[in-house]
Each structure stands twice: as structure tokens, then as C-alpha cells.
Amino acid sequence: MLAIDSEGMDLTADVNGEAVPIRIQFDHVLADAEDAHQTLIAMVKQARVKAK
């Protein structure tokens, strides 16, 4: 993760040996640090379900 703000996060992914920038928008504007924490946890849980 390169950066995070109230609307989304900037990541770098390795695609075929090349660093590719990615912007992931949140489903709502984050209110505070606790909201960011809970939102990221929910996103990880959702990704795990979809990866199965």
C-alpha cells in the first residue's frame, strides 16, 4: 500500500515483473481511523470468501 485517504487506497501490484499502480475506491467515504480499520478488515474478509 502506497497511500490511503478517505475515498480509497493506492497500491502497487507486480504484474509480469512490472510494478503497476492500482487505485481501489472504498464503498463509502471513511469517517475516521476506526472506520478505516473496520473497512479494511471487511475488505480482507470479502476477498478471502471470493478467493475460495
Image: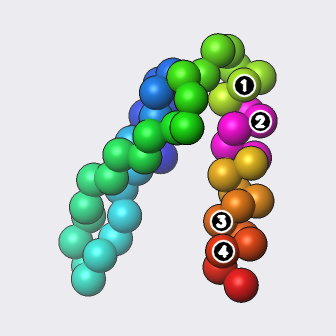
Question: Which label's residue is closer to the chain start, 3 or 2?
Answer: 2
Seen in the picture, residue 49 relative to 41 is either above or below; the reply is below
Disc 3 packing (10 Å; few <14; some 14–19; many ≥20): few
Which portion, as a residue range, is magenta? 37-41
Q: Which mark is residue 50?
A: 4
Marks 4 and 3, how far apart in space? Answer: 5 Å
Q: Amino acid at mark 3?
A: Ala
Q: Which mark is residue 26?
A: none
Where does the image place residue 33, in percent across and percent down from the top left? 69, 20
Q: Amino acid at mark 4?
A: Lys
The C terminus - image quarter:
bottom right
Question: Which label's residue is closer to the chain start, 3 or 1?
Answer: 1
Q: Residue at x 56, y 29 (%)?
A: 28
Q: Amino acid at mark 1?
A: Asp
Where does the image place residue 35, in percent across and percent down from the top left? 72, 25
SS label for mark 3: helix
Marks 3 and 2, how far apart in space? Answer: 14 Å
Marks 4 and 2, how far apart in space? Answer: 19 Å
Disc 4 packing (10 Å; few <14; some 14–19; many ≥20): few
Marks 3 and 1, how far apart in space? Answer: 18 Å
Name the residue that disc number 1 marks.
35
